Image: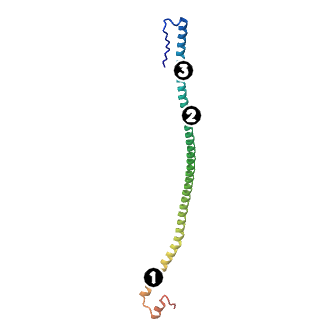
Amino acid sequence: MQAVLYLHSNTVNAFQQEEREVLKVLSVQAAVSLEKLAIYEELNRTNSALLDLNKQVERQSKELADEVAARTVQLHEKIEQLKHAKNEAEKAKAEALQAKDEAIRANRLKSTFLATMSHEIRTPFNAASSFLRACLSEVLGTTALLFDSVLSPVQKDCSHPNLTC
C-alpha cells in the first residue's frame, strides 16, 4: 500500500519550519496508520482463514469420531458373532465326540452280540448237524441194506416210510 501527501503553495517558503515539522509528523503518522491498517486487514484475513480451518477441523473431527464410533459398534458386533460361532463350534465338537464315543460303544456291543449269537447258533447247529449226519448215515445204511437184501413182499411193504407194520 502506498500513499502520497502532496501540499502545494505558490509562494516560496509558504510553510514555516514548525508547520513543516507538523506536516512531517502527520505524514509519518498517516504512513504508520496506513501500515497498521494493512496489518489489521491481513490479520482479519488470516483470522477468517483460521476460523474456516478451525470449522473444517471440527467438522472432520466429528466425522472421524462418528466413523470411529460406527466401526467400534461393528467390531463389537463382529466379536459377538465370533464368540457365538466359537461356542457353536465347541458345542458341535462336543456333540461329535459324544457321537463318536457312542458309535464306538455301539460297535463293541454289536461285535459282542454277533460273537455271542454266532456261538449260541453254532453250538446247537453243530449238535443238530452231527445228529442229522448220524441219522442219515443210519438211514442210508438201512436203505442200502434194503436195496442189497432180497425181501419178501411183506418186508417190502413194511420198508415203505409211510407204512407201519
Q: Secondary structure at mark 3?
A: helix
Q: Residue furthest bottom?
A: 153
**Residue under the image location 46 percent in, 91 percent down:** 156
Pick the front one: 68 or 81 = 68
Q: Earlier in the sequence, mark 1 or mark 2?
A: 2
Label drawn at residue 158: none
Pick the front one: 43 or 132 = 43
Within 10 Å of the Cα at label 1, are there few (<14), some (14-19), or many (20+) other Cα atoms?
Answer: few
The residue that disc 1 covers is: 140
Q: List x then y, in percent, for residue 3.
A: 49, 17
Q: List x then y, in percent, for residue 80.
A: 58, 47
Q: Earlier in the sequence, mark 2 or mark 3?
A: 3
The residue that disc 3 covers is: 37
Q: Earlier in the sequence, mark 3 or mark 1?
A: 3
Q: Disc 3 versus disc 1: distance between alpha carbons? A: 146 Å
Q: Disc 2 versus disc 3: distance between alpha carbons? A: 31 Å
The residue that disc 2 covers is: 58
Q: Which amino acid type is shown beneath numbered disc 1?
A: Leu
Asked whether disc 3 touches disc 1, contact meaning CB atoms under 8 Å apart, the reply is no
Pick the front one: 157 or 121 = 121
Q: Secondary structure at mark 2?
A: helix
Q: Disc 1 versus disc 2: distance between alpha carbons? A: 116 Å
Q: Is residue 72 above or below residue 12?
A: below
Q: Which amino acid type is shown beneath numbered disc 3?
A: Leu
